Amino acid sequence: MIHKIAPTHPRASSLIIREKLVDGFKNGIVVPHGLIAHGRGEAFDYLLGERTTKYAYEAEKAAVCLLLLSKKSIISVNGNTAALCARDLVTLSNVTKSRIEVNLFHKSVARSNTIARILKKEDAFDVLGLDDKSKMMIKDISSNRKYVDKNGIMNSDTIFVALEDGDRTESLVKKGKKVISVDLNPLSRTAIASNITIVDNIVRVIPNMIKISEQLVKKDKYYLLQLINNFDNKENIHKSLLMIKEGI
Ligand code: PTJ
């Protein structure tokens, strides 16, 4: 049960996010480490003015183009993202025809099943990453994120990841896959290694991407390709860093 937060409170939206995570922790979706990870993200968000910057929006647009152009795209879901935006993640997967896979750093079958149940309650067509028979291991990843679904992340050309450690992104990019990441810390290994890095809060990213997808879904392939080709990820990360510097 999310505590009632007065909408007039000057920090209302930030407090609501905290409440959702605490609630997710109590319901076995979020790990304690997820609360700490949120604190780091929250600090960057504060410096960014808790809004989607023009650079983040450009990255979100490029990310949508990549999802729409991919043959097999997949959205990787962890405890924090499930607690914060399960319904929006399902909507994004539907509009971009991406599959969904639960992939946890702090592995737990019970937590994976709880997260999958929530996603299915929000109308997810299918959720991968639960079946032991299709589990595969990516050898050069040391964390539990190495366990992926052979029909999901392993078989995808584009993987959308959010709020995670760097190992997996580095490894997936080395394998020739395209990685889109959401990370409020533009200096993280995930942010640096990704093909498209979105420096914005996941709670704003996914609704933005849904709206952008609805606008771009009917555009032809060349239009989408051109938008991606005009996007420079390193330059975009640099601009986000400058915004943070300005915030300081
Ligand atoms: O549910 P699990 O077991 O898969 O674990 C999830 C966590 C988040 C605990 C795990 O992936 C982790 O430890 O992540 P890190 O290494 O702390 O990285 C999380 C990154 O996400 C940090 O760089 C934060 O700045 C960033 N971050 C935190 N909250 C948000 C965020 N980025 C975007 N939106 C947020 N709301």
Image (cartoon, helix red, strand yellow):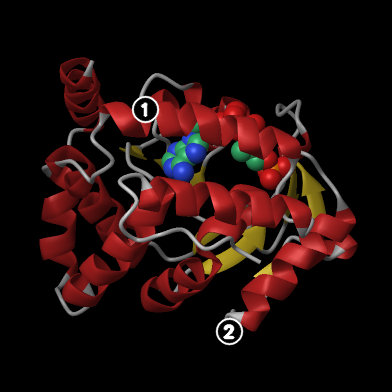
What amino acid does circle 2 point to? Asp
Where does the image place residue 192, in percent across and percent down from the top left? 39, 24
Q: Quadrant of ligand 1?
A: top right
Question: Which label is found at residue 224?
Answer: none
Q: Give me the residue at 38% from left, 45% from top.
A: 201
The amino acid pointed to by label 1 is Phe
Q: Quadrant of residue 235?
A: top left
Q: Is mark 1 within 8 Å of ligand 1?
A: yes
The image shows residue 107, relative to residue 245, as above or below, that is: below
The residue under the point 44% across, 78% down is 94
Helix, strand or loop under label 1:
helix
Instruction: Name the residue tied to disc 2.
Output: 123
Question: What residue is shown at x 11% (from left), y 53% (from top)?
Answer: 226
Q: Distance of mark 1 from mark 2, alpha carbons?
A: 32 Å
- Which of discs 1 and 2 lies nearer the camera? The answer is 1
Return the residue at label 1. 44
Specify the quadrant that holds the C terminus: top left
Q: Residue at x 18, y 33 (%)?
A: 232
Q: Residues within 10 Å of mark 2 (few under 14, many from 20)?
A: some
- Residue 240: image location, x then y, percent: 22, 28
Q: Please rate how many residues cluster around mark 1, counting C-alpha atoms within 10 Å: few if below 14, some from 14 to 19, many from 20.
A: many
